[in-house]
Every structure is written in structure tokens, then in C-alpha cells.
Image (cartoon, rainbow, N blue to C red):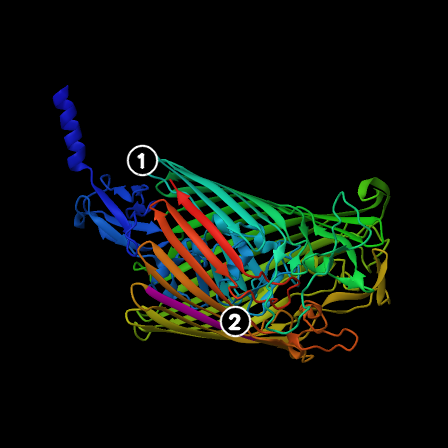
Amino acid sequence: MKFFLMFFVLSNALFAQNITLLDKSTNEPISNVHVFNNTKEKQNISDIDGVLNISSFKNDALLYFQHTSYLDFKIYKKELSNKQIIFLTPKSNTLEEVFISASKTEVKRSRIAQEIAIIGIAEIQKIGAQTAADLLAEIPGIKVQKSQFGGGSPVLRGMEANRILLVVDGVRMNNAIYRKGHLQNSISVSPNMLERTEVIFGPSSVMYGSDALGGIIHYITKKPKTSEQFNSTPSFLTRYSTVNNEFTSQAAVELQFKKWATYTSFSRSSFGDLKMGRKRSHRFDNWGLQPLYSNNSETFYNENPAINEDPEKQKNAGFSQFDFLQKFYIPLSEKTDLNINFQYSKSSDIPRFDRLAEYRNGTLKFAEWRYGPQTRLLISSQLKIYPNKKWVQNGTITVAYQDVKESRIQRSFGSLKRTYRNENVAVFSINADFEVPLAKNNNRMLSYGTEFTYNKVNSVSKGRTLLVSGNEITGFGENFTVQTRYADGGSSYASTAFYINYRQDLSKKETLNTGIRLTNTQLNATWIDETFVVLPNSTISLNNTAVTTTVGYVFKPTKQWQLNSVISSGFRSPNIDDVGKVREKRGLVTVPNINLRPEYAYNAEIGILKYFKNKKYHIGFSTYYTLLDNYIIREAFELNGNTTILFDGEEGDIIANINGGAAYIVGGTFTFKANFTEQLYGKTALTYTKGRAYDTGDPLSSIPPLFADAQFGYTKGKFDASLNFRFNAKKKFEDYNLIEGIDNIEQTPDFNEDENTGTGNPAWSTLNFDLKYTLTKNMDFLFGIDNIFDQHYKEFASGISAPGRNFSFSLIGSF
């Protein structure tokens, strides 16, 4: 028996082949590296010490190593010896080509003609964004507007809200009530759960359908992987920020088995009142100050505004949010994988800061204006198949259900009448995407697919009169009728689409991408209550069909040059919010327009990339021209011959979404990225946008001024630090759209409403510092100083001043 045990131990020592995976920059071990062979029949995961057992692979097997934060690596097993060390190169430190999934299949970046951006997990962790909207603001080419701190409306190429398509794990987030103007739903995905975020700029309707006029933002959450041996990897994140007393904590665990794997994550963030910057280089001493605020709540009553002892502290900015993510990965066979995805997000009440800071007759207008708890539920099942048949080499079938709830609660000072408007959207969707090579060397690829989505919208409202005793709300008196935000008889929005995409490597230097998509949308809505709004038709049915195309061409004359060109079209079919919304803002009441038609975009762009010194440096430039036809704009409107209407007890001027004629948006982005040495790196980006209507000559809404950022960093061993400079040019008064109200000209420092004059939004700049230090192989410490010089400023069109000087402290670890 002793001889047998000794023989067993020696055999395992001799035949078990382990390798160690280390970070090329820090020499630290890398856990969770996925290794597999050609067929993925055999696979394994490195442990917390970076050790990986490859004994199960055949000696002539080609091994593929993958990790979200590192470049892919492959090597034949026979080239490895026992205990050999393999160094992986971090993606953030290289300009080498990487794989992306924004086109629904893994394609080399060098084959994609569109302007794109990718931000991986290592950079996400280093940025330490408080919300997903703050994360997007760090991506070159994206600006983010905020009406309140609990939100963030990304702007891509002068378009935002329902002209931008949000996607999470391959499922579109845009639903039938995503609105025009500013949309704050980007925060409903926690940045702490993201593995990467991908952005495609410009119309992308061939692959993704309606809404993708300005571009696509694709959130990709963390996913589990299987392992030959059982592995359990708990992880955590905790962060504190001084500027708004932020506390964020996340706990997660990944369990890896041979035949299945799971990833579970809980995240909670709480934010307090937001401190603005004190240094006023713009010389507007009172701009953004908050001398008065409302301290009314669900249960507390104050008939007058309260005095803010510190006007630089923005009251009614705080909120909290809880996020949960549960994923299962089950390889059903060698040719079939199943992914199950469950996501749930819930916020607290979110005060609408800009409306709570709105004045009327010399004092605050609203005692209460808040969003009720916003919830987002996603349940999806994704089946990946690899049949290797004549017409299907691989494919992905995704079935998803989403349930979104949001509400608005309002009450004016001097009134005991509180209004409630509640919306619930249920979304069912199914996507089927397939790919097949048309040549043995895969230089000709055909992809095709179909998509169906169905939105059911339920909109209800009520009014309740408060009963008050002193400062306490003791109950409710009589109820009263309130106009619903959307059709009270129910509404639905459905979309059906088919697409074909073809990619061919014309030569080693040229790649051609083409695609065409047919989309049909069907909208139905019924209004019952006619107390306030009487429409020409109480029931409507709108049917729209569109064909969109894309042609992209990539030419690489040498290894140092890449030239891209794209001609594409996109469209946006009016949704429930466009056609049937009723709401009030600053005396303007939006009413339904049942005759609204789709808007179209026709886009042409070129891009140039120049690499230097083995791609350690690169300069990039892209420019585009987008023609908008039948563009949707808010303008004065008549309803039944009337130009005014009664809303929540006050008379307002009627406006509605209508179709304009033609408009254009032009712009460009310049980028530079470099690894000066093994330790020094830098990058910079500059973005310019301009948009005007051909038919009226007016500026378009949502066009940001020139903006830029530059970063210079140093990394060595366990240490990584960087300085970041951000700049925003002045938005001139004459460049504002004064008709729609989306640009929020009233938020500028010297706007005179009576004379309709002002100077616009001042230029601003900030300097920021980030530090990451590896304490142990399992734990990182991150420290940041944002807005070092404590500058006061507002982002263009935002209703809240940007954060002042902020110190943040984070710990990230795994076991």
C-alpha cells in the first residue's frame, strides 16, 4: 500500500503540467484566465495564484488563453515545459488589434470601418465611476447631460435620448417610452458589474434597427466560465467619495464547475447632497448657487422654501441604488452553450433637481418633484450553437423579458394637491443571429438574423389632497383627476426585422462590409379620459416600414496605415413617448401628435489611423456628415384650434413633436495614443460637432461645444498613476436651440428671458489625478482627486452644477 501511494504521488508530480500566468507589466499572477483548445472540448481556468493545469490537453493541441483585461494569446502545448511562466500583455498598455462583439460576432477591430470605442474592466475599475453615466463621460466622443445627479443622458454625434440605442448583454434597453430630449436611464446598470462597454458611433440600424441614429452603447456584464476543477472566487469592491458622501459596496462570487458555472453580484450605492466647485473662473459669482431649497418629503410638510445654510451644497441631489446580477453558463454539449441572465436594479426616490430649483414669482415653484423608485428587471436566455452546417456555422438565439417601472410625483408650493403618474413597460424580445463562412479561409462571411420586440405600456395617474398638521402630513383628503402621461387606455409598440450582413476580405489589405435590414413597426394607443385633452381620434394605429443599408470599406496600404470609409442609413420610428406624451415644463405643455412620421438619417464618414513604432503610437482622425430627413422637433402646436391648455391647474402654451424638413450634423474626432516607454503612456481626444436645420436655419438641440481630454500616466510594478486634463469650450448663445427647450438655455448664467439674450455656457477645464496601487496579489487600493482646483462649472444643457473637488478611496479584491 505504501508503495502504491508513493507511485501515485510521483505519477501526479511527473505528469501534471502546470504553468503560471503573470502580468507583463507588474509580474503579478493573473487569475481567471480561460484556456481552451480548438473545439473547446477541453478548457480550464487559472487559480488565484495564476497557476493553470494543462495536463488534460493533448501534446499537439493549440492552446488559446483569454482574459477580459489582457490580449489573447495562443501557443502549442508541446512548446511548453513544466512550470513555465507565460506573460500576458494588458490591453490598456497596447495598441494591438483586439476582438470586439459590438457587431454581434467577434470581429477584429482592424476589419471594422465605423468609429468605435472600447473600455475594459481594468480601466473601468481605475476610473471608479459612481454611476454608469459617469463611466460613459470618460469615453472620448461622448458627452453626458444631467438634469439631476441621479441620471445621465449620453450624447453621441449631437444626438441623445431615444436617438441613441442602449444595449445590455445583447438585449436592447430602449423601450416604447424612451423619450426625446434628455434620458436618464443609462444609470440603471451598475458600472461595478461591467466587464466592458463598447460604443459604435453613427447610424447602425442594419444590425440593431430603430433608434440607432447617433450610435450604440453596449453594456457587457461579467460572465462566468467553466473549469476542469472546482473554483470559488469571491470578490469585493468598496468606495467612499467626499464630494457627495458616496458609499458604494459590491460583493460577488464566481463558482466554476466542469459542466456549469455561475456568477452572482450584489451592489449598493448611496449618494448625499452634492458639493459644487468654489473657484469661479467664469466670474459669475451667483451662478448655480442654491440659497433656497425644498425640504418637503413624502411625510414632511413645509409651506415655504427652506434657507440653505451652504448655497454651494446642492440639496435634493442624493439618492441610492441597488443592483443584482445573476448569471449561469451551461455548456450543454460540444456544440451548444446556454447562458441565463437575471438582472434587477432599483433606486430610491430621485429628486428632480432642476425642477426643484425652478423659480416662479421670485420664489421656488415646486415643493415636491421627484421620480419614484425606478426598477429594471431583465431575464434573458441565450443559446449559442456551433452546428458547422452549410448555412449556419454558429449562431445565437436570445429570448428576453424586461419589466420597467417609473413614476413622477409633483406638488407646487402653495398647494396641497399632490399628483402621481406611474408608468409600467413590459418588453418581450427574441433575437436570432447566425453566421456562416462562404470560403474555407473565412475571408468571406455572411451573417443574417431576425428580431422581434413587443412593448406593452400601462400609464395611470391620480391626485391626492394632503391633510396636514403642523409640519406632518397626517393623511389624504379627496382625490382628484390627473392627466396621465401616456394613453390611459393602454398602448403597445412592436417591431419586426430581418437583416443580412456580408463581409469580405478583398485582399490582405482590404475589407468590405455591407448590410441591409428591413424593419416594420406597429404602434397602437387608446385614450379614454377626455377631461383635459381631447384628440381628433381616441384610438390610433401607426404602421411604418423602413429599409436601411450600410457599406463600409477598410484599406490598409501598409501595416502603419488604416483608412476607413462608411456610407450608412438609419431611421427612428416614433414610439409611444414621441406620439402620445402629455407633460409640462416651464409653462410649455407637450400634447400628443398622432400624425408623427419616422425620421431618417443618411451618413457618410471617413477615418484615418496612422501607427508608429510597432503600433506603440497611433494618431486617428474621423469625420462625418449626417443628413436628417423628416427630423422630429418640438414646436408650437394647435389642438382643436387652441394654443393653450390647462395642466395641473395651470394654463400653458401647447407644443408637440412634429416633423421638420431636412437638417445636418457634421463633426469629427481626433485621437492620439502612445506608449512612450514601458512605464510612460498617454492619450488625448478632441471632438467637434455642429448641427443646423436646412429648412429654418436654426441650430439643432443637443449639439455640444468643442470638448477634449488628455491623459498622461506612469506605471511600474504595483504602481499606476495618471493625470487627466478635461476641457470644454464655450457654448455660444447663438448656437442654442431656443425653441425645443432641450438645450436648457435658462441654466446659463446670464440668460434674460424677457429680452431673450445671454452669452451662453462658459468654457471650463479640470485637472484630475488617479492612482492604483497593488497591495497584495488579491487586493488593489485606488485613490483619486477629481477637479483638483475646485472649479465651478456646468456641463452643457445640464440642470445641476458639476461636482467640486472630490477625494475618492477604493479597495478592490478577490480571494
Q: Position of residue 243 (x, y in %)?
A: 57, 56
Camera-nearest residue between 66 and 771: 771
**Is residue 686 located in the magenta-colored stretch of the structure?**
yes
Task: Report the residue at 38% width, 46% height from top.
Answer: 779
Neighbour tally class for label 2: few under 14, some 14-19, many 20 plus, Cα within 10 Å? some
Query: Vertical placement of 469 versus 191: above or below?
Result: above
Q: Position of residue 701 (x, y in %)?
A: 65, 71
696 sits to left or right of 461: left
Residue 727's tag is: 2
Tag nearer the camera, 1 or 2: 2
Camera-nearest residue between 587 and 45: 587
Q: Quadrant of the C terminus?
A: top left
181 sits to left or right of 364: left
Q: Position of residue 171 (x, y in %)?
A: 53, 51
**Is residue 617 located in the magenta-colored stretch of the structure?**
no
Q: Amino acid at mark 2?
A: Phe
Magenta highlight: main SS: strand
What residue does disc 1 label?
229
Q: Amino acid at mark 1?
A: Gln
Q: Quadrant of the N terminus?
A: top left
Please tell me how many numbered marks the rendered image carries.
Answer: 2
In primary-sequence order, the first of circles 1 and 2 is 1
Query: From where the camera sits, is residue 47 visible?
Result: yes
Q: Which element is circle 2 on?
A: strand
Task: Report the residue at 41% width, 65% height from top.
Answer: 112
Task: Report the residue at 56% width, 62% height from top.
Answer: 212
Q: Which element is circle 1 on?
A: loop
Provide the residue span drawn in magenta: 680-689
641 sits to left or right of 703: right
